[in-house]
């Protein structure tokens, strides 16, 4: 009996099978394309909404520091200087510039072109240098958010005046300022040097960044040592028994517990039971530490596992105790892996919002926190709060805050990847 | 058979010392075969395989005769596994692997871009080093490929085919009561025979065996060897083996590979009694490898 | 503060002595006679000086706080009539007065008295704690340095301590779980004292408005959690409809079809989706996706609200994609190559191999990863807080606004908190429900994945 080639290998398989194969591949490819396009849309949306927050409109005015208005007695007492009506200086110079009588019925509209908080700028100038009184100085003042949005083209001028944030009279004034070169667009320093504010044009993320930094600091101090030590115990010393099994299941489960539950834990244990201050970075840090602990344990165990037993045996054969072998030989070799894992866990903690809501880190806090027990907010919580404001200017700032948060995350993850590549060892 | 095993272990144990006289006892059994077939199934022409630019198989040409067993022997890393995987284009799965040359099957170069790789593999079956039954029932393991290729259309045909394949692979009596058990529940030798049964279920003209017995004990190996002997009446078999005694027992022709090159290829009786090349002699007498 | 300094000083001195003494004991500098490296004798003394003193300090601190509070508040007249939150406030006031900023507040005679007492007590406490802790440290130092001898197994003892310390660290994880369970359980218990347990579990109406004054209209809220749960499941379901096919097909494509180079770029890119903070997704959903869906609905004549379940579910699905794709990718790759080879060698196409051999083999693992993703979606907070609705509605219509467990927890707890109000406590009951639900899913998923891994190892 002789063997026959039962089919001609040149004839293709049935078209149905080929079609199915192609369809399957297309499904896979389109899934990837869908996921990536969502990523791209997300980034484009945030970026296109947020980039304009990095510059800001200023109005250049000649301010006459009129002595009669500031300090008519000439005594230069601090209290007098503190309480003087600086807003009037601004409106006076504005009226002069635009040739408008101060009793004009719409003069208040003109006043609101300049940010309400601008008088603080003048006051600080005077307090720093009282000799300025009586002089006329050119100062760039922050324009109000509506002016800023109009200059950036975010307010449609075609709709009727009642539905517009900015009146025809104001537009006229702005155009005049513009034609005289008094409107400037500069880098938005306030975004990085100020904390939260009710006025979008003077609000910034400094307080939130510091709050986030404090939280992470507390989280690192607690979760890294505890996590690494716990991992060493479980990986190197623990005997396989019911207790260690239980601890292990516990850790794996904790890694998947919803973050908001950690927030509830923080609220009832740290705030209600231990009476730690509400809204403070120390509580936030503690909660984030507990949250990132399981991840750190899991990553550290993986790094320890990757160090081959020959290293342990080598050290022990030289007369080192098991403890010495692990701390002197194994742990240093596992450090790059641990670092990578820790950074990634912290990056996740940095972006976490829900538990912070539970412990009250979403209060309106215009001051920059100094100590870790001061009330503070955190970057993601600030984003959440700003996202709630209806003003267009806050939408812009929310997106900018997101960009800042994302850039922090990118830097952290890039560091982690760098460490992994630089120190990666193949056993 | 049994005596051969004893010989085999002796050879391994004593290695070099027993040297050349070892050739004689093998030939004494007078079982070494010669090729008698005139028909060529596969003609390999100047095949070179390289991974990432590193040459693994270097310019090999040989003809595989129909309905005979061709054994590929050689020390590990000599390229025989890579070579056998070329014959049904299993190397296509591996990235950065380039193959030059021609392999003619039935008058067609299988590396011709028009060849349907799937169709090719239904013609050239393969059995692997480690038994790899799918984590499914024995029945499903066998019927998987026939179903794919539309060889069966109803339950009774399937049952018949499963029975026939398992019988041909000499496994049916052992497993007929538990066809729904998982294929992974069988012993190693049974698993390997299941894989062979799986391969012959789609009626291939050639079966490639990549060290089919290396993971098995001697008894299971012996059964497989007997199976090979039966199968070759229908199917051309190419077998890669580490075990020279196995090559001597089952094959008509033997090819000796070394460092990616085909050193010697001729009738098994010639290779084991009167090799032309010094390296072949050195290998089969255990000087290296 | 001085206490710490004193204890540390003592401990470091102990370290120094502990290290020196064995060196003096050995003759001819023959260190091999010593049981351990001299460092370990130092560590041994150091630990004995430090740890007991610190433990004493924290224990005293913990109890004295309660004691001082009790004594001080007893001086305040009619303390029994003041509500709990007010007591806290008064105590804070006393503390601030004691620190010298008395003129900032009213100078109530009784409070002045109390604050003076507070100052006095604090001084006594500080002084006594300093004495106790420092003495303890010093006594232990003298006692243990006497124990040092050539045969003393210092290294073993120190290592035993370190091992114990490592064990304590790993127990922190257990303590966290215990903390979660206890805090949720006890607050929920208080809630169920006021609202019947069955009403909460099986109630169909959720409107947690509790009147602040008793005479207000609608003073009794309704706490039936069913509509909240169905809302959660609706959004989770929508998220899964997006994430499971996309995640699974991405994993299949990456593990089986994509080239190594393509794979090594695409995989991290998709994983970026998992690294984006959820608050960003929430913002994206509320600002872009919601209005987009509403407008699309309008253009085809559908009335879709901006805060529809569809919007929150869709964005959550996008977030979940990498969880499913990464885990499934690992699981598909864990199926041994020889099994794939077996299928290819029989003439199966890639998709046939995937559908009939690899996926069935990997199914338990994939189910596990999907369960983990479901647990993730149920517990997800920020996206739904920002993009889903507030009012509980019993509906399966994805175009309507629904609310979720997490949204309700946030709305109930953000803002004023009174811990004897069922409104606040309801958040903990919901939290308990959420925890049990996710715990169940997680344990099941972990078990399945574990079993799967063992099979191929």
Image (tube, rainbow, N blue to C red):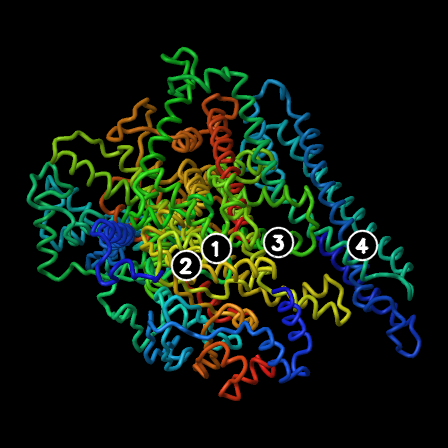
Q: Nearer the viewer, mark 4 or mark 2?
A: 2
Against B241, residue B148 (above or below) is above
Q: Circle 2 marks a residue in which chain? A: C
| Residue A122 seen in the figure | yes
Q: Which residue is mark 3?
A: A231
The mark lying in front, picked from 3 and 4, is 3
A306 or C94, which lies in front?
A: A306
Asked whether, in this view, residue A427 is left or right of residue A197, the answer is: right
Of A306 and A127, the residue lying toward us:
A306
Question: What residue sits right under mark 1 in the picture?
Answer: B132
Same chain for mark 1 and mark 4? The answer is no
Image x and y of residue A189, in percent = 31, 59
The tag on residue C341 is: 2
Occupied quadrant, residue A102: top left
Q: Nearer the viewer, residue C79 or A258?
A: A258
Disc 3: host chain: A
Q: Residue at x 48, y 36 (%)?
A: C441
How crowded pointer 1 is (Cα within 10 Å; few <14, some 14-19, many 20+) is rated as many
Residue C321: image location, x then y, percent: 35, 47
Q: Chain of mark 4?
A: C
Element type at mark 1: loop
Cα distance, mark 1 to mark 4? 60 Å
Disc 4: which residue: C48
Residue C119 x, y percent position in the rendering? 68, 39
Q: Is residue A38 visible?
A: no
């Amino acid at each position: 009996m002789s063997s026959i080639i039962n089919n001609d290998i040149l004839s293709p398989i049935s078209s149905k099978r080929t079609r199915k194969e192609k369809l399957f591949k297309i499904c896979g490819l389109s899934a990837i394309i869908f996921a990536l396009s969502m990523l791209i849309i997300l980034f484009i949306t945030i970026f296109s909404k947020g980039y304009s927050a990095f510059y800001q409109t200023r109005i250049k005015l000649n301010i006459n520091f009129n002595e009669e208005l500031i300090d008519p007695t000439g005594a230069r007492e601090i209290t007098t200087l503190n309480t003087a009506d600086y807003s009037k200086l601004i409106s006076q110079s504005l009226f002069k510039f635009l040739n408008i009588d101060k009793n004009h019925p719409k003069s208040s509209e003109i006043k609101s072109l300049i940010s309400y908080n601008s008088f603080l700028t003048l006051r600080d100038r005077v307090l720093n240098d009282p000799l300025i009184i009586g002089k006329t100085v050119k100062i760039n003042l922050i324009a109000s958010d509506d002016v800023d949005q109009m200059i950036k083209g975010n307010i449609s001028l075609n709709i009727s005046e009642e539905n517009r944030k900015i009146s025809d009279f104001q537009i006229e004034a702005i155009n005049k300022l513009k034609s005289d070169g008094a409107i400037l667009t500069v880098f938005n320093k306030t975004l990085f040097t100020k904390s939260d504010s009710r006025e979008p044009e003077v609000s910034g993320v400094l307080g939130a960044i510091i709050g986030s930094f404090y939280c992470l600091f507390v989280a690192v101090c607690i979760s890294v040592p505890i996590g690494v030590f716990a991992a060493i115990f479980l990986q190197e010393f623990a005997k396989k028994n019911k207790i260690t099994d239980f601890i292990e299941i516990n850790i794996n489960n904790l890694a998947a517990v919803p973050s908001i539950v950690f927030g509830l834990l923080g609220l009832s244990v740290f705030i209600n039971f231990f009476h730690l201050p509400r809204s403070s970075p120390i509580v936030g840090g503690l909660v984030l530490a507990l949250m990132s602990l399981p991840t750190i344990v899991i990553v550290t165990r993986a790094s320890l596992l990757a160090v081959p037993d020959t290293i342990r045996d080598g050290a022990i054969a030289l007369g080192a105790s098991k403890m010495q072998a692990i701390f002197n030989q194994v742990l240093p070799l596992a450090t790059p892996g641990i670092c990578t894992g820790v950074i990634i866990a912290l990056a996740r903690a940095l972006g976490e919002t829900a538990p912070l809501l539970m412990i009250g880190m979403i209060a309106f806090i215009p001051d920059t926190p100094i100590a870790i027990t001061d009330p503070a907010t955190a970057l993601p919580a600030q984003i959440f709060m700003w996202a709630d404001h209806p003003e267009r200017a806050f939408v812009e700032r929310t997106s900018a805050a997101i960009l800042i948060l994302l850039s922090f995350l990118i830097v952290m993850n890039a560091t982690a990847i760098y460490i992994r590549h630089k120190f990666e060892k193949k056993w | 058979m049994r005596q051969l095993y004893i010989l085999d272990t002796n050879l391994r144990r004593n290695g070099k010392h027993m040297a050349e006289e070892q050739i004689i006892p093998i030939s004494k059994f007078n079982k070494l075969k010669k090729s008698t077939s005139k028909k060529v199934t596969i003609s390999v022409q100047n095949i070179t395989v390289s991974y990432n630019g590193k040459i693994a198989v270097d310019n090999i040409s040989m003809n595989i005769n129909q309905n005979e067993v061709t054994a590929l022997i050689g020390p590990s890393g000599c390229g025989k596994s890579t070579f056998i995987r070329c014959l049904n284009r299993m190397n296509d799965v591996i990235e950065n692997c380039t193959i030059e040359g021609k392999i003619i099957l039935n008058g067609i170069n299988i590396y011709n871009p028009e060849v349907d790789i799937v169709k090719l593999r239904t013609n050239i079956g393969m059995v692997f080093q480690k038994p790899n039954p799918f984590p499914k029932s024995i029945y499903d393991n066998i019927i998987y490929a026939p179903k794919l290729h539309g060889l069966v259309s109803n339950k009774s045909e399937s049952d018949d085919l499963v029975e026939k394949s398992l019988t041909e692979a000499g496994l049916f009596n052992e497993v007929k009561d538990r066809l729904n058990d998982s294929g992974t529940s069988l012993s190693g030798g049974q698993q390997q025979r299941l894989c062979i049964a799986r391969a012959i279920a789609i009626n291939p003209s050639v079966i490639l065996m990549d060290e089919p017995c290396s993971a098995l004990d001697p008894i299971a190996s012996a059964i497989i060897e007997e199976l090979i002997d039966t199968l070759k009446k229908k199917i051309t078999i190419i077998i890669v083996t580490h075990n020279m005694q196995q090559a001597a027992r089952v094959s008509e022709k033997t090819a000796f590979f070394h460092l990616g090159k085909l050193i010697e290829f001729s009738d098994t009786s010639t290779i084991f009694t009167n090799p032309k090349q010094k390296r072949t002699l050195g290998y089969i007498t255990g000087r290296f490898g | 503060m001085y206490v710490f300094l004193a204890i540390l000083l003592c401990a470091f001195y102990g370290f120094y002595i502990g290290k020196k003494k064995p060196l003096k004991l050995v003759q001819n500098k023959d260190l091999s006679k010593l049981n351990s490296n001299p460092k370990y004798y130092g560590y041994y003394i150091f630990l004995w000086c430090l740890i007991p003193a610190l433990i004493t300090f924290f224990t005293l601190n913990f109890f004295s706080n309660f004691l001082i509070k009790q004594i001080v508040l007893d001086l305040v007249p009619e303390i029994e009539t003041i509500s709990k939150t007010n007591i806290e406030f008064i105590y804070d006031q006393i503390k601030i007065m004691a620190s010298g900023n008395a003129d900032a507040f009213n100078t109530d005679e009784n409070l002045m008295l109390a604050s003076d007492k507070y100052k006095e007590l604090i001084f006594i406490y500080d002084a006594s704690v300093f004495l106790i802790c420092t003495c303890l440290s010093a006594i232990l130092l003298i006692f243990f340095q006497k124990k040092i001898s050539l045969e003393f197994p210092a290294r073993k003892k120190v290592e035993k301590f370190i091992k114990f310390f490592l064990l304590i660290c790993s127990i922190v994880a257990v303590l966290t779980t215990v903390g979660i369970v206890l805090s949720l359980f006890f607050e929920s218990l208080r809630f169920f004292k006021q609202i019947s347990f069955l009403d909460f579990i099986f109630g169909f109406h959720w409107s947690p408005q509790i009147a602040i004054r008793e005479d207000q209209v609608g003073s009794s809220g309704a706490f039936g959690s069913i509509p909240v749960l169905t809302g959660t499941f609706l959004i989770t379901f929508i998220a899964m409809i997006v994430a499971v096919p996309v995640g699974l097909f991405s994993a299949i494509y990456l593990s089986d079809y994509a080239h190594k180079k393509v794979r090594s770029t695409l995989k991290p890119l998709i994983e970026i989706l998992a690294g984006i903070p959820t608050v960003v997704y929430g913002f994206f959903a509320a600002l872009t996706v919601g209005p987009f869906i509403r407008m699309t609905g309008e253009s085809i004549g559908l009335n879709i609200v901006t805060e529809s379940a569809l919007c929150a579910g869709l964005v959550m699905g996008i977030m979940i994609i990498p969880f499913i794709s990464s885990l499934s990718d690992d699981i598909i790759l864990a199926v041994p190559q020889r099994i794939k080879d077996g299928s290819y060698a029989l003439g199966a196409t890639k998709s046939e191999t995937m559908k009939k051999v690899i996926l069935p083999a990997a199914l338990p693992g994939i189910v596990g990863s999907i369960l983990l993703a479901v647990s993730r979606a149920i517990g997800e907070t920020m996206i739904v807080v920002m993009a889903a609705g507030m009012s509980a509605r019993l509906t399966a219509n994805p175009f309507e606004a629904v609310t979720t467990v997490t949204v309700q927890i946030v709305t109930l707890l953000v803002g004023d908190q009174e811990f004897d109000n069922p409104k606040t406590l309801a958040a903990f009951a919901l939290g308990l429900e959420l925890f049990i639900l996710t715990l169940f899913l997680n344990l099941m998923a972990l078990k399945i994945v574990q079993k799967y891994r063992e099979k191929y190892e």
